[in-house]
């Protein structure tokens, strides 16, 4: 791990997170605030998972930098246009970096829908992609995944696009996108393009927000 300062003088620590699925040294990069306590000791709150405020927005992010936005799609009911064998939709919402949903090979416009089970005020989304088929020697190279994220309220038919990456030329294996707050009870990821020779795989499709979480036993009551 290593640390550096932002323009406001706050310290941030960078570290690697083990994946180790395709290779023993497969990693992802994490970043969190750090600083010094009243006794001059170097402290870091710990590895974060949910959205944090960007550097420079809070004067002492090491004292608390969480946005308060919680995951709304975690382990919620999922539906999709198709599934490849052994790559069920649930793998896209299980918060496990080593599992992923993958559509069938003949599915040319894959989509994944999540029923949130309640109305939430949504603020951001994160898509973590898998790259099944990646093979440098065969010419199957990393590239941009193109998609859009749509949401809708309960008992409504029209989907509203909150993130449009259908023309993206950027290669983001972990793609986090904030958007203007919107209330919704359903979310859908529509995949419109992916690198040649690579099948689209979704390690994690997460919508972050605030709202009411029904108590256990009330899930499944929604259409």
Image (cartoon, helix red, strand yellow):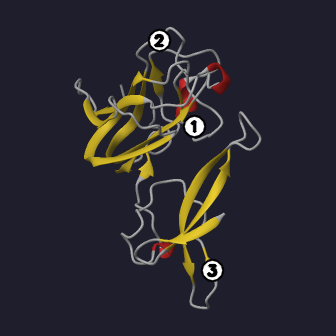
Which secondary structure, mark 2?
Answer: loop
Residue 77: x and y, percent? 48, 29
Looking at the image, tell me whether mark 2 or mark 3 is earlier in sequence order: 3
- Compared across the picture, whether 203 is left or right of 6 comes to right
Label 1, secondary structure: give it: loop
Determine the CA span between mark 2 and mark 3. 51 Å
Assign the C terminus to one quadrant of the image.
Answer: top left
Q: Residue 217: x and y, percent?
A: 49, 38
Whether residue 52 sits left or right of residue 129 in the image: it is left
Relative placement, left or right, of 30 versus 20 is left
Seen at 54% across and 31% down, the residue is 142
Instruction: Work out whether mark 3 precedes mark 1 in sequence or the reverse, and give the earlier one.
Output: 3
In the rendered image, which quarter is residue 13 located in? bottom right
Q: Which residue is mark 2?
A: 107
Q: Quadrant of residue 119?
A: top left
Q: Name the residue carrying label 3.
A: 42
Lower sequence index among marks 1 and 2: 1
Q: Label 1: which residue? A: 94
Q: Is residue 203 visible?
A: no
Crowd around label 1: few <14 · some 14–19 · many ≥20 (10 Å): some
The residue sitting at 49% across, 76% down in the picture is 63
């Amino acid at each position: 791990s290593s640390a550096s300062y932002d323009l406001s003088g706050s310290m941030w620590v960078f570290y690697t997170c083990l994946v180790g699925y395709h290779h023993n040294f497969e990693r992802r990069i994490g970043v969190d605030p750090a600083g010094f306590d009243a006794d001059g000791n170097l402290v870091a709150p710990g590895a974060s998972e949910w959205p944090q405020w960007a550097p420079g927005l809070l004067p002492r992010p090491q004292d608390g930098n969480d946005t308060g936005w919680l995951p709304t799609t975690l382990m919620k009911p999922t539906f999709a246009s198709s599934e490849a064998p052994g790559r069920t939709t649930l793998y896209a919402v299980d918060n496990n970096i080593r599992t992923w949903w993958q559509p069938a090979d003949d599915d040319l416009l894959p989509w994944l829908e999540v029923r949130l089970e309640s109305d939430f005020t949504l603020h951001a989304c994160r898509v973590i992609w898998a790259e099944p088929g990646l093979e440098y020697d065969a010419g199957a190279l990393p590239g941009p995944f193109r998609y859009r994220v749509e949401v809708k309220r309960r008992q409504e038919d029209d989907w509203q696009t909150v993130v449009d990456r259908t023309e993206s030329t950027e290669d983001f294996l972990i793609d986090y996108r904030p958007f203007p707050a919107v209330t919704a009870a359903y979310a859908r990821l529509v995949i419109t393009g992916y690198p040649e020779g690579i099948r689209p795989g979704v390690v994690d499709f997460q919508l972050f927000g605030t709202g009411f979480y029904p108590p256990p036993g009330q899930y499944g009551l929604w259409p």
